[in-house]
Structures are given as structure tokens and as C-alpha cells.
Image: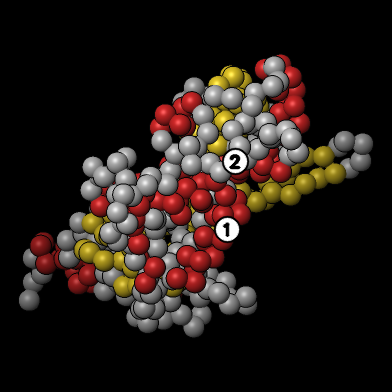
Amino acid sequence: MIATPTLRGTVRTIASLLAFGALVGCGNDYPKGWAAVEHGVLTSMKGHGCPNLTGTYRTRSRAADESVPGLPALLEEPRVVGAGAGMSVIGADTLTVSGDANTSLTLTYARSPETMLELREKFRASNKIIADMYERMLNPETRHSERFARLTDQQYEDSLNRIFVAPLRTRVIRFGDDYQCSGGWLSTPRLEQDTPPRRTDAPRPVVENGVYQLGKDKAGHLVLHTQFRRVEETWLWCGDGCKGHIPLGTWTQNHWSHWAPTLPAATVDTARPWTAQPRPGAVDLLPSMETLRNGPRSASTESKPVQTTSLEAFAARIAPLLPAGVALDSTIAAAGGYKVVVFADAQPQISQLLRNIQVSPTFATPDLVKTFKNSGNGRIEAHIFVFEKQRN
């Protein structure tokens, strides 16, 4: 039989794919003892040549002696936005991949009730004010109050998820926009940014160096192959400032990681207590917008504060309470107290300021009005009402 050009091309394609599979599956320091990667010819010829990555994988371990690698940027969980953006988020217990990689994949991140409890404790420790607000919003009386009554349940839940991470979160990645496929591997560029030698130096640019390749082995593990180039060099020192770099060459690095198959983390924490019917005459447990703008909560049990200090004297008394990195922008006399505007580099600094004010002998518990990222300077801007303690 004489091979036609089409047949010869098909044979060359199959031979190339087999050779590539042998190279990646067995070469490049592929770890001994790992099952072979499943990137067969039929998989690579289907659609765009994308692998079947569907399954659930363990991404976190509670065992002290077991380390689970971090996920590549393509598979990372979306960042928390909104009021809870500054909190330290504990990673999800499992990642579930579903869909056809030739078009798009849905990534589902699940946290167990134990992880959610641990996360709540960290959240409260880092930002008690916002944590208290979140707990009040779980109450059906807040949900059904006049302020939120017009929101659908989904809109209300979206608001909650902007304050505190949900036990179940999803995102979608798409072929062409987020990744490519070749030879039964899903791939995406590896980006890196070098640290400048001095803090005062301008940030180094983000550059592409290498590639991430994702596949699935025959034992059901999600496998990651990271390949990039690294310049190796050594230092020469000959006394009195005589030193310099000696380049040793550029080497191709191959790193391998994998995540074991598992069952999705139990997420019984998805109960929504705020959906229950409120008691008759529901009371809004959060401060009204007018109260936030003009003064303390009307439901406060503290005695009404009295403003007795000039703005200059107040600024001098509040300054020692500012954590490092927090700048006082302005103070305004309002509603028997003072409205303070500060700028900080991160949300935890605002939380620390609130704690400093709360435990001070001079001021009563403060009210956090709002906090957001200032588009002008890129810093966290916070508006806080501060009141002097009632003197006996």
C-alpha cells in the first residue's frame, strides 16, 4: 500500500504526538512512582486537543506533616472583593473541575464547615467591626428591614459574599481567552516579576518566562508541569568591594506538582439563616445611612456623647492612636463627635486603629462609616465617627 499525502501527514502527526507524550510523561525529570499522564492520541485529536481534567482534587491538608502545593494562577480562586478584601483567606479544601476544556471549564472551590469556622475566627480577630456587621446581616430582621426589603435573595447573598468568603465559590475559564491546548495538555504562559535590588527602585516589568501545562494521570491526579528558564550565577569577592556576578549559564527548569483525587468538601455551611421569617415589626440591626453620615447608631446603649474638645486638640489626641502606615487626612465636628478620614495601606491597619480607639481611656467605641480603595492614591480610605467618653 502506498501512503497518500493525507495519510503520511496523519502518520507524522500521530508520531509527533507520541514522541511528545513520551518526552513529557517520562522525561524532564518526571517524578518516579507517579502514574503516567493520560494524553492519548484520541484525546489530543479531539476538538482543540484539550485533555479531560474533570474531577475533584484535594487542595488543602490539615495534617501537619503533609504539604499540598499551591495552584497555578490559572486555577487560583478569585480574590475576595468589597469590605472583606483585606482579610486573610484560608484556601479551599477541594477544587472541582467540570466541563469540556475544548470550550470552557468551571472551577468550583469548596470549604468544609471546620475550615469555615477557622476562617470566621480569623476574620473576627482581624476586623471585628466588619465581622459584627456580617453577623448582623445574617439575622432575618436585617434582611427584611426596609433598607434591604427590595433586594432579591440573590442580590442580598451577593452582598454577603462581598463581606465574607462563601463556602462554595465558582469561576469559569475559557479556551482561547485563558488557556490553549496542545498534544493533550492544557497550557498557559508562566509570568514572573523580579524584585528590584532596592525598595526605592521602580517595579520590574511582568514578563513571560516559560509555560504551565496541566494534565491528568492514569491514577486520577491533576498534574502540573512548570517549565521555565533560569540564569544561574555566582558571586566573586576578592576583598575591599571587589565583587561581581559570574554567569554560569541559562538552564531549563522542570518542576512537577500533582493533586490527589478526592470527594468534594462537605459544605453544609451553605444554610442561609437570613431567609427565615422575621419577628413582627422587624428592626434594622444595621445603622441607617443618615446615622452613618451624621452620628452614632440610634440603637446605641451608651450615653449620648458630648463634644468638648477643639478640632486641633482632638487631632493631637487621636494621632498617637494611629498605627504605622496610617495617615490622618481630616477631622470634622459632627453630631456630638468627630468624623475622621484616614488613609492606610491595608484593611488590617484600619481594624487596628478601631481597636486602639476602643481601648483608649479617652474615646468611646467608634463607628466605622465606610472603607474603600481611593482611586486617586490607591490607598484604603476610611471614614470613622469618634466620640469622647461621657465624663461623670
Residue at point 23% right, 56% down?
104
Percent of width and height locating residue 152: 23, 48
Q: Which mark is residue 231?
A: none
In the rendered image, the vertical position of residue 317 relative to residue 69, given as above or below: above
How busy is the neighbourhood of tag 2: few (under 14 within 10 Å), some, or many (20 plus)? few
Between marks 1 and 2 in the image, the one whose residue lies nearer the viewer: 2
| Residue at numbered disc 1 | 122
Say what secondary structure mark 1 lies in: helix
- Residue 61 left/right relative to 354: left
9 and 63: which is toward the camera: 63
In the rendered image, the vertical position of residue 250 relative to residue 342, given as above or below: below
334 and 39: which is toward the camera: 334
The kind of residue tagged 1 is Lys
| Residue at numbered disc 2 | 302
- Residue 45 left/right relative to 385: left
Percent of width and height locating residue 170: 32, 58
Percent of width and height locating residue 43: 22, 70
Percent of width and height locating residue 310: 70, 17
Assign the N terminus to one quadrant of the image.
Answer: bottom left
In the rendered image, the vertical position of residue 386 relative to residue 245, given as above or below: above
Say what secondary structure mark 2 lies in: loop
Residue at point 54% right, 54% down?
123
Assign the C terminus to one quadrant of the image.
Answer: top right
